[in-house]
Image (cartoon, rainbow, N blue to C red):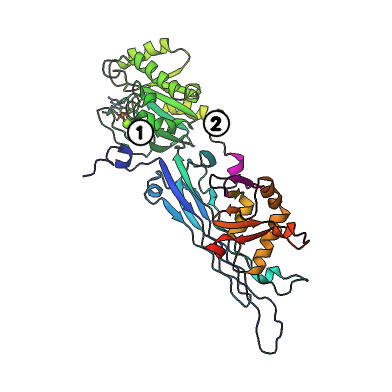
Amino acid sequence: MTTTKIRDHRIFSGFIDTAHIYLKAGNGGNGACSFRREKFIPYGGPDGGHGGKGGSIWLEASSNITTLSEVASHPHISATDGCKGQSNRKDGSNGEDKTIYVPRGTVVRRDGAVMVDLKEDGQRFMVARGGRGGRGNTAFKTRFNTAPKISENGEPGDEFEARLELSVLADVGLVGMPNAGKSTLLSVISSARPKIAAYPFTTLNPNIGMVSHKGKHFAAADIPGLIEGAHDGKGLGVTFLKHILRTKMLIHLVDPRGFGDMKPEKAVRVIENELKDYHPLLAKKLTVLVVTKADLPESEQVFETLRKKFKKREIFLISSVANKGVSRLLDHVIKLLPTIKEEELYQAAKEVQTGLGPPVGKGFKVAVDTEGVFNVTGARIEKLISMTNFAQPDSWERVHGVFKTIGLDKALKKAGAVQGDMVRIRDCEFQWSDAARKAGKPGKFAYKYKKYNEEYG
Ligand SMILES: Nc1nc2c(ncn2[C@@H]2O[C@H](COP(=O)(O)OP(=O)(O)OP(=O)(O)O)[C@@H](O)[C@H]2O)c(=O)[nH]1
Ligand SMILES: [Mg+2]
């Protein structure tokens, strides 16, 4: 028997509300560089097709799923690459997109920033974008270069680690000490069948039930019982308090017999403090107090005492077992719900809203490391390098041209680069030289680079 897994009761019981996933969208296919060669057709021209697009990864919210356990057990998710282009203008086929289904209420984070909050059933979000297909040499034909020996490699697909956090979406949260009768109430008002028993901590995971009352519908969530210190991690409660953060209102259930030695009024105060200490939002949430087990003789007295002590709260007396007062409580809930505005808890950070990852900067940065290598970073320039087929002389020319246009040459010189210094962009290393410039040649390119690997590798 393993001990490590059993320590986390959430894994044990099959309910998982956080998951780390590793995403790799498909790379674009490489473009082809070829020329039409047919008998009686001289100078057939370039006919290299484009590469296909890499498959993207989508997340889709589904109300049929209630836990992240499926995703958590298969965390490596990839989509297929695009196929490469071929001669005769044949474009490569696209990679296939992949869809991963997650429960409603799943918040997706990348490097801590919220990418999206998937709230609606069927809501889709492209979490990792497949790479663009590289262009074949047909795309590079110009009036001046009718036989381009250049094609692009496919763009790499997004690759990163994301964190999924499930925060259950329900309109009403049932809270209270263990054994207060939360699960029993949920089983009476909805078709959910949570475990009920005469001992504390019966409920180990949140249960959600759809309640229909007088033509109105709402979702109610029952979470494990809270005890003193829950906000600090005592009992089971703290793990699940986040699941009631998004509810519109709370029903706080009180056992007329209290909890252990604790009197009902003390129990109410303890729970109210726990909610407040966990998140100020919970203290602000509209809360209805409900004394349960009205069929027990002491319940009436407790109800009267609490009514006097907690004047600001609406208070009800119910018996789920004898079905007493439940309908009146539901009348009150359906009257209140439409008046409560939903709080926007997870604002997607603007730069990652598109699902394309952190902002794609136009610029670049030059930094010299301890070995004296000039490291150049920048989304655009890195993309250019990864899409360049260095086996083609024309590609070299294009890269030289871009380096000059964007001012990389000047920046390197300013950073102190001298003849023979190493310049690194992604996994490519170049040897820097300004020989052409010094010689006063007004040639096409002021600076020359040689790919390090080719010369010395
Ligand atoms: N007499 C009486 N007993 C009730 C009533 N409602 C619940 N109970 C009993 O109280 C005990 C606890 O009920 P649960 O619904 O499991 O309580 P809970 O609040 O969900 O408990 P935890 O999941 O441990 O936090 C069970 O034995 C129920 O049968 C009621 O209206 N009247
Ligand atoms: Mg319960």
Mainly helix, strand or loop, the magenta region? loop
What residue is drawn where x is 58% and y is 53%? Answer: 424
**Between residues 388 and 283, which one lies in front from this camera angle?**
388
Position of residue 208 in the picture relative to residue 446 (left or right): left
The spot of residue 291 in percent (x, y) is 36, 20
The residue under label 2 is 343
The spot of residue 7 in percent (x, y) is 28, 37
Q: Is residue 325 visible?
A: no
Q: For the residue labelled by badge 1, is the local secondary structure a helix, a strand or a loop?
A: helix
Which numbered marker is on residue 20? none
Between disc 1 and disc 2, the foreground one is 2
Ligand 2, seen in the image, is in the quarter at top left
The spot of residue 173 in percent (x, y) is 43, 30
Sort mark 2 into few (<14), some (14-19) or many (20+) by Cα contacts within 10 Å: few
Q: Which residues are magenta?
A: 348-373
Mark 1 or mark 2: name the one nearer the start of the chain.
Answer: 1
Q: For the residue labelled by badge 2, is the local secondary structure a helix, a strand or a loop?
A: loop
Taking the magenta stretch, the answer to whether it contains residue 272 is no
Quarter containing the N terminus: top left
Q: Is residue 273 visible?
A: yes
What residue is drawn where x is 69% and y is 52%? Answer: 409
What residue is drawn where x is 65% and y is 86%? Answer: 38
The spot of residue 117 in percent (x, y) is 52, 41
The residue under label 1 is 188
Taking the magenta stretch, the answer to whether it contains residue 367 is yes
Position of residue 161 in the picture relative to residue 455 (left or right): left
**Between residues 37 and 129, which one lies in front from this camera angle?**
37
